[in-house]
Image (cartoon, grey):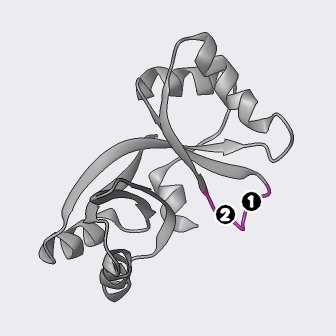
Amino acid sequence: MLAKQISIFIENKEGRLAEVTAILRDANVNIRALSLADTTDFGVLRLIVNDNEKAELALKKEGFTVGITQVLAVEVSDEPGGLNKVLDPLCEQDVNVEYMYAFANPQCKNAIMIFRFDDPQKALEILAEKSIKVITSKEICDL
């Protein structure tokens, strides 16, 4: 039930992000979610896309350093405290959130969050115990 995320290391300079998105556009890859974290010299662009293999191939062909990371896409109730319904049981069992970002999904009234946990297998078990929906890679591609 782990989803694949593409991480791309890009220089922190004008036009680099547009270059990456143009490569994906030309490869007919649709971006489902993204997060960009930067420093003075470089950034890490994290993407959930509809076709990881095609995206990775196209980006590497153009000289980008690309990594694949396992993450969890989790449905979160769109209400006050909805995120805590996910975070509290994980915190109680010492599962750390390394990072997270939102996922736009017009087909669902609930929010979808992408999580990178320090122990994804333990997180999966806890979420299953609490009947919290984890979105599969296939479901992400089909959105």
Task: Using a 10 Å C-alpha cutoff, classify the residue at mark 2 as few (fewer than 14 neighbours), some (14 to 19) or many (20 or more).
Answer: some
Specify the amino acid type for callout 2. Answer: Asn
Q: What element does badge 1 sit on?
A: loop
107 part of magenta stretch: yes
Q: Residue at x 38, y 53 (%)?
A: 5
Q: Position of residue 51 (x, y in %)?
A: 36, 68
How far apart, in angstroms, are the residues tagged by discs 2 and 1?
6 Å
Identify residue type, mark 1: Cys
Looking at the picture, tell me which residue is in the foreground, 36 or 84: 36
> Residue 76 location in percent, x, y?
71, 42
- Can you say whether 25 is above or below 71 in the image? below
Which residue occupies the extreme bottom position in the image? 26
Disc 2: which residue: 105
Q: Are marks 2 and 1 in contact (CB under 8 Å)?
A: yes
Residue 132 location (% of width, % of height): 67, 33
Outermost residue on the right side: it is 80
**In the rendered view, does 104 fall on the left or right side of 44?**
right
Residue 45's spot in the image, x, y percent?
37, 60
Up/down of 60 relative to 40, above or below: below
Q: Which residues are magenta?
A: 103-109
The C terminus is located in which quarter?
bottom right
Above or below, comparing residue 140 to residue 21 in the picture:
above
Give 13 or 120, whichever is nearer the viewer: 13
Residue at 28% x, 59% y: name it: 42
Determine which residue is flagged by label 1.
108
Residue 81 badge: none
Q: Is residue 75 left or right of residue 64?
A: right
The residue shown at (37%, 51%) is 4
